[in-house]
Image (tube, grey):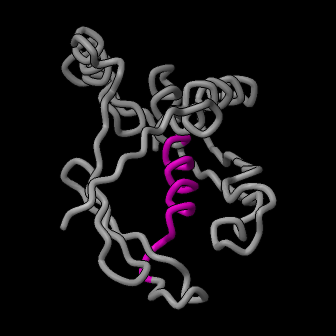
Amino acid sequence: MTTQPETQDHQIVNGLDITAVKEALATVAAAPGASRAPKTSRVRWLGGFKIKALVRNHEFVVDEPATFTAEDTAPNAMEYVLGALGACFITGFVLNASKQGIAIRNLEVTLDADQNNVFTFFGLSDEGHPGFEHIKAKLYVQADADEATLQAVWDYTIQTSPVVNSLTRVVTIQPEIAVFP
């Protein structure tokens, strides 16, 4: 994508109205408690290994690969985590580059991950943990900026990524159970 000309005091970069983005950010920043960005989700079992997740006014299906006698109709939860990480990288990179007036022509992120020991999830091992141990993310970009500038945007994107921070920092999880008769 290229930078489009300004129209009525609005600069469009990479399909984003930068003036509107800055106004929206100012509005959100002024709201009490907005920095906490509360999120909610409902996740419902559909039978077998199939699950439906509802987030805001969206829904998506989670399933396991056919090798686990599942229907393989959707990515599994760990694959969604990887996809969410990539989506967060692209969202952040587009936002940060656009705010600097950098036009992006092409953008893609590839992610390769290894789980420490998925067998612990299946009850086949007591060693290690089933979570990701290593994730390699590579940005492929064509943009109207030099490599050093794009590297700085990428570094800032990684540093400020909500998904990166959720994966790399300690998160308190409070599990509860409600049993119905």
Q: Quadrant of residue 175?
A: top left
Residue lying at 73% horizontally and 75% vertically, measured from the top left: 124
- Rendered view: 90 above or below 73: above
Q: Position of residue 112 (x, y in %)?
A: 72, 58
- Rendered view: 167 above or below 151: below
Instruction: Please give left or right for residue 162 compared with residue 151 in the image.
Output: left
Q: Position of residue 109 (x, y in %)?
A: 62, 51
Residue lying at 67% horizontally and 72% vertically, measured from the top left: 123
Instruction: Please give left or right for residue 86 compared with residue 57 in the image.
Output: right
Toward the viewer: 29 or 93?
29
Total count of labels? 0
Magenta segment range?
Answer: 73-89
Residue lying at 30% horizontally and 12% vertically, measured from the top left: 29
Q: Position of residue 141 (x, y in %)?
A: 64, 44
- Rendered view: 40 above or below 108: above
Q: Quadrant of residue 142?
A: top right
Toward the viewer: 160 or 91?
160
Residue lying at 76% horizontally and 50% vertically, measured from the top left: 134
Instruction: Please give left or right for residue 153 compared with residue 71 in the image.
Output: right
Toward the viewer: 143 or 24?
24
Toward the viewer: 95 or 181?
181
Residue 9: in magenta span: no
Residue 79: in magenta span: yes
Magenta: predominant secondary structure element? helix
Q: Position of residue 72 (x, y in %)?
A: 48, 84
Q: Quadrant of residue 10?
A: top left
Residue 106 shows in this picture: no
